[in-house]
Image: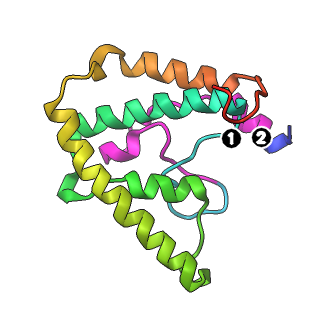
Amino acid sequence: MSAQAQALAAAPLHFNNRRDLPLHRLPFIGPVRGRTQFSFWAVPRTGGYAGGNEVGRGLARIYLKYLKQHGRPEGLGALQWIVLDMIGPAAASALTPEQSALRGQVVGFFSELDAWLEVAVCDLEGGLDAQSDKALLALVNAGLRSDECSEEGES
């Protein structure tokens, strides 16, 4: 494990309750080295496949709870920006026409899903509130610390 990965692994995620915007308070949104703007996926890439799966599931539930509580201010969700930052930031000026098309498809696809998810979390019962934010964050941080190196797809 590189020194940078070890440093990130040592720092658990936390809610950033002092930030002005509720969206920016989510534990996976924050500064990353080499960027002037917040990343919508500032999550250490640790824990192996199984740990990563737990991290993703826990952070997804935290995002759904955020949607239920705050909705999509001004009709703008964040799911598309989360996905773009998961796959890696790229300067728009450096994209090929194919990459630009894919980026547009990602934004359109996940923006539409975000709108429907907002409605679903507000109108459907699915046990979303069964776990507290604190419990979900503990699950996420346990996944980040997991050192299981199982093969991808074996969950």
- State yes or no: residue 18 in magenta: yes
x and y, in percent, of residue 140 in the image: 54, 25
Residue at horizontal 47 percent and vertical 36 percent from the top: 27
Range shown magenta: 5-32
Kindly tell me whether residue 67 is visible in this rendering.
yes
Q: Which mark is residue 63?
A: none
Q: Quadrant of the N terminus?
A: top right
Left or right: where 65 falls relative to 1: left
- State yes or no: residue 99 in magenta: no
The image quarter in which residue 6 lies: top right
Which comes before the other along the chain, label 1 or label 2?
2
Look at the numbered discs 1 and 2 and tell me whether their residues touch, using CB distance below 8 Å.
yes
Closer to the camera in the image, 42 or 129: 129
Q: Callout 2 environment at 10 Å: few (<14), some (14 to 19), or many (20+)?
A: few
* Residue bearing mark 1: 45
Q: Secondary structure at mark 1?
A: loop
x and y, in percent, of residue 26 in the image: 41, 39
Left or right: where 30 falls relative to 149: left
Looking at the image, is mark 1 or mark 2 nearer the viewer? 1
Closer to the camera in the image, 67 or 114: 114
* Residue bearing mark 2: 5
Residue at horizontal 28 percent and vertical 18 percent from the top: 127
x and y, in percent, of residue 102 in the image: 50, 71
| Prevailing secondary structure class for the magenta stretch in the rendered image | loop
